[in-house]
Amino acid sequence: MEEYITVLKQIKSEILSSRYLIAKVANRELLNLYFKVGKVVSEKAASGKWGSGTIKNLSDDLQSELKGLRGFSPTNIKRMKQFYEAWEPYFLISPLPTNQLENNSDKTGIIEISPSPTDQLKLEKSSLMTNQFVEKFLLVSFTAHYEIL
């Protein structure tokens, strides 16, 4: 019976550890996605190519084309834009390796959540963008980030 309880505890520990890892990876990917969506919306709005109703149309079209899609209401898309604009100065945005090979700047790059080169030089003076900060940043949900903003 003791052996069974030990195995039960071991398996339970593995399940919980795996769940935590999955949640951590999923959160990182969601933050990456929301940052990229925010980037696109911010750039289009700044260029004057999008009017005030475009975000609503974008939301409606996304939800129409991707049945069951959640989290892309007009309000949330505006929040993604704010999220991008608030954090963009601090993060390095690098193109996908395949895009670098193709030399095609129109494709969306990946967001590398790490200090920008300028911030890396300043790390000795400021602890804002240390690896520890980035690690903690990625553990916080998008909703919590928006509340902070």
Image (tube, rainbow, N blue to C red):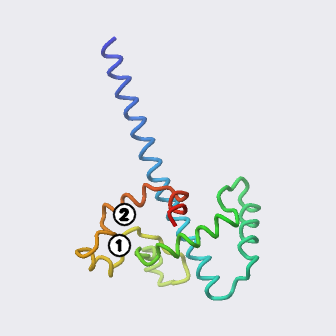
Residue sitting at x 45%, y 41%: 19
Measure the C-alpha gap from mark 2 to mark 1.
Answer: 8 Å
State the quadrant of the N terminus. Answer: top left
Q: Amino acid at mark 2?
A: Val
Does residue 49 lie above or below 34 as drawn?
A: below
Residue under pointer 1: 115
Query: Foreground residue, 62 or 101?
Result: 62
Q: Give the percent coordinates (x, y) of residue 61.
A: 75, 67
User: In the visual, does 80 lie left or right of 50?
Assistant: left
Q: Residue at x 48, y 81 (%)?
A: 102
Side of 20 relative to 35 (left or right): left
Residue closest to the eye, 54 or 143 = 143
How many other residues sit within 10 Å of disc 2, few (<14), some (14-19) or many (≥20)? some
Mark closer to the chain start, 2 or 1: 1
What type is the residue that disc 1 sits on?
Pro
Please, which residue is most extreme toward the left here?
A: 124
Give the number of callouts.
Answer: 2
Percent coordinates x, y for residue 44 in the rendering: 63, 82
Q: Position of residue 28 (x, y in %)?
A: 46, 58
Q: Residue furthest front?
A: 148
Query: Relative to residue 111, is residue 120 drawn left or right?
Result: left
Residue at which label 2 appears? 134
The residue shown at (59%, 82%) is 43
* Circle 2 SS class: helix
Dots 2, 1 in contact, CB < 8 A:
yes
Q: Residue, x 50% and y 65% (percent of image)? A: 32
Circle 1 SS class: strand
Report which quarter residue 72 is drawn in: bottom right
Q: Position of residue 49 (x, y in %)?
A: 69, 86
Q: Residues within 10 Å of mark 1 (few under 14, many from 20)?
A: many
